[in-house]
Amino acid sequence: MQKIKQRHNTIAPPCDGVLEAIGSTPLIHLRRYLESSDAQLYAKLESCNPGGSAKDRPARAMIEHAIVSGQLDENSTIIESTSGNMGIGLAQACNYYGLPLICVVDPNAQPQNIAIMEAYGAIIERVTEPLYGDFLKARLTRVQELLQQIPHSFWPNQYANLQNPLAHEMGTVQEVDAALHGEIDYLFVATSSVGTARGCQEFFRKQGRNTKVIAVDAAGSKLFGGPGGKRRIPGMGSGNIPPLAAEQDFHQVIRVTDLDCVTGCRRMVKYESILAGGSAGGVLEAVRSMIPELRTKVCAAILHDSGTRYLDTIYSDEWVEQELGCSPEELQIRIEQPSHAARPSSPRKPFYIKAPILEHASV
């Protein structure tokens, strides 16, 4: 049995309101996930934010910046397109400041996430049909319609708002860097609005660091030149290229499948007793696919949310078999596959995004 360590935690001062509790999330040394001592792997548990995800950071930043800059006042209504976590983060921040919020969601949004938004007081606006085959386009079109209909309405626009990456540049990655004393060779980040990855990239660039940022994207996403396709796990990938992705030059892009995400989540529970969210599983499997290149390296992975919001999908054998065609027996084989035998779902390559394509994206 592993020797038990005694840890003496310092006591943090009281927070002045729940939003002040955002950030300073734990960084965990994962000693078992890779089954290898060749690489050091650390995981940033963003599920420990009060709203349950990394999106708490930009949600607070966008709302508070809009208040300070005069874009929002007590008569404003906030409207945002969201698939889940950003909606929850905004609902928490808007409720705290007494501001009404309308979240435009589509059928892929988790029922539990919608229930949490509603518990915070958000109004849910649903789109039921994709536009030109894409639900994000349908959500954004509905946002524009609501902005025209509702006086004093405000769109934070997580896809283009620079407060999104700035929140991660000044918070998430800075915390990781400080905890590891600046010794990070690789940082793995899931991409959707690209806010987190962009913020991390900016931090390392300004610090003059050589840390390699690995963008983890979903198979079926159009973010990095992909053909697009069906994606069942929210929080990673996009049907369009958001403005925040423009001019971003990541070291590598790794695409992961829905089944990779499930495998990573289940493996995380088995080996580390951490219940991770969907995109986190994909990020962890991306790390595992690069084992030969990571020998002697220090790696960090940002895990955006908790698996508690995926109990009916990723952690349900019935759902995995029905939706992904993988039996419990086959899934167990994938989970227990040795790390040195793990393979990436698609080729890795450097990628440079030249220009934004997403419509209705100005701020």
Image: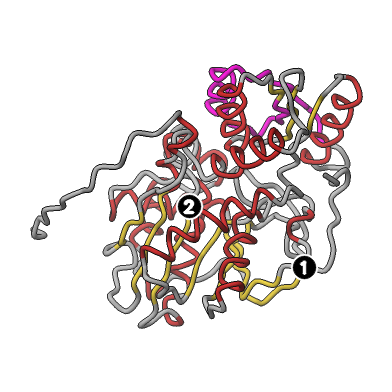
Q: Which residue is mark 2?
A: 280
Q: Amino acid at mark 2?
A: Ala
- Magenta span includes 8: no
Q: Where does the image place residue 154, in percent across and percent down from the top left?
A: 79, 30
Q: Which residue is mark 1?
A: 247
Please say if 304 is above or below 32.
above
Which element carries disc 1, helix, strand or loop?
Answer: loop
Q: Where does the image place residue 204, in percent across and percent down from the top left?
A: 56, 71
Q: Where does the image place residue 142, in percent across and percent down from the top left?
A: 84, 29
- The part of the image, by quadrant, that contains residue 267 is bottom left
Q: Residue at x 61, y 50 (%)?
A: 236
Q: Residue at x 73, y 32 (%)?
A: 80
Task: Say which label, 2 or 1, has the lower sequence index.
Answer: 1
Q: Where does the image place residue 352, in percent across and percent down from the top left?
A: 75, 72
Left or right position of 12 against 327:
left
- The part of the image, by quadrant, that contains residue 99 is top right
Circle 2/circle 1 CB separation < 8 Å: no
Q: Residue at x 83, y 35 (%)?
A: 138
The magenta-colored residue range is 103-130
Distance from label 2 to label 1 (Cα)? Answer: 25 Å
Q: Amino acid at mark 1?
A: Glu
Q: Residue at x 86, y 55 (%)?
A: 357
Please say if 52 is above or below 302.
above
Left or right position of 194 against 33:
right
